[in-house]
Amino acid sequence: MSHKNNKNDDFVTSAIGVVLGLGLTAIFFATTAIMLAIFFLLKRPISRALHLEWCSRSWSSMKWLYVPMKWLAGIMFLFVLFVIEKKLSVTPTHVDQIMVYIFALCAALPCGLLFNILHWMEQYSEDPAIQKKMAGIAAECYVQKLIEDCRKEHLPASRSLHGKLLVFNEHMPNEFSVEVDHMLITERNVFVIETKCKSGTLSAGADSPTWKVSSPYGDSQMRNALKQVKNAARVLQRQIALPCELIPLVAIKGNDVKIVDSPTNVLVASDLGNVLRAFEHDKPHPILDPASVIALLLSHMNDNPAAMKRHIERANAARVRAEMTEIVNAASIR
């Protein structure tokens, strides 16, 4: 009788062990699936927090380092999960199994996260739209540094703005806005500066609707950036009524940049300091208070994403109208 009871106890223990083991295995796979889903859902927040789009610019030069790191992290992630799956054997020590699983999960999480981060960087590095965007941001940062260095060394009384949206008649039917890459307000001039990232030889006629860009990779065209910044300068001049004409400049940043057939206010970015000093030298007497001009502009600055969205919609609509007008004007009717 005692022997039979022992066999029953062993059967119950084995059954409980099987149920708990299967339960732990189910938890293992469910948690792994949830963890992978979290990695996927958190792609954008993690990318923004770690500036992965910006970091992806270094992928090509550091590929020899990043690729082994990526796959090593992936192998470690799978290895840890495989080991813990083996540890989830059917034994009475289920508390120990749970603790081992928790520790393994903590070890697998950073490995999986590192793999995903490096994988996302690789994706971003191969996306032309993202790389174009990042190159544009890098060019704007470069020009901003040139402006601030010039201010510090030659124009201590000047003021500057970078990457600002100025909105006029906000929430009115006639609302309009101007986005400026850079503004430099000195005691003699107000410069409105547009930055473009292009490489190669740029044929930049002042009145041409488009500019031709020639590089070893082929020829392309871009919209006339001088017309764009001239329009912005005219709008600002009309709104703030300064006693001087705003000076539009286009600074081109890129590799082996050469500019031909262009006015002097379309320039290679590295020459910006010389051009600014030339315009300053042309007006020997101060006529502006930079602090007062900034105060006039501050009331129109708007960092609201909704305002930027409306600005982009208006800009796109204006671009379409301009393209339609160019088609009509270029037609040969008779």
Image (spheres, rainbow, N blue to C red):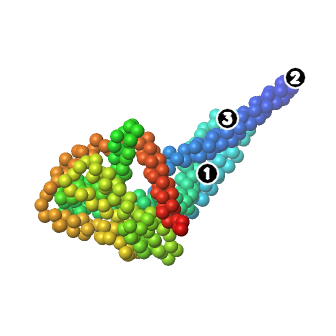
Residue bearing mark 1: 77
The answer to which quarter of the image holds residue 156 is bottom left
Which tag is nearer the camera, tag 2 or tag 3? 3
Q: What's the amino acid at mark 2? A: Met
Q: What's the amino acid at mark 1? A: Phe
Badge 3: residue crowd in 10 Å (few <14, some 14–19, many ≥20) = some
Helix, strand or loop for disc 2? loop
Instruction: Find the distance from the CA under tag 1 to the CA under tag 2.
Output: 51 Å
66 in relation to 316, above or below: below
- Asked if residue 277 lies left or right of residue 144, the reply is left
Residue reaching furthest to the front: 334
State the mark number for residue 1: 2
Q: Is residue 164 visible?
A: yes
281 in relation to 103, above or below: below
The residue sitting at 25% across, 62% down in the picture is 149
Which tag is nearer the camera, tag 1 or tag 3? 1
Q: Position of residue 150 (x, y in %)?
A: 23, 63
Q: Quadrant of the N terminus?
A: top right
Q: Is residue 87 visible?
A: no
The residue sitting at 17% across, 67% down in the picture is 281
- Asked if the residue at tag 3 contacts the one at tag 1, i.e. Cβ–Cβ closer than 8 Å, the answer is no
230 or 183: nearer the eye? Answer: 230
Residue bearing mark 3: 94
Q: What's the amino acid at mark 3? A: His
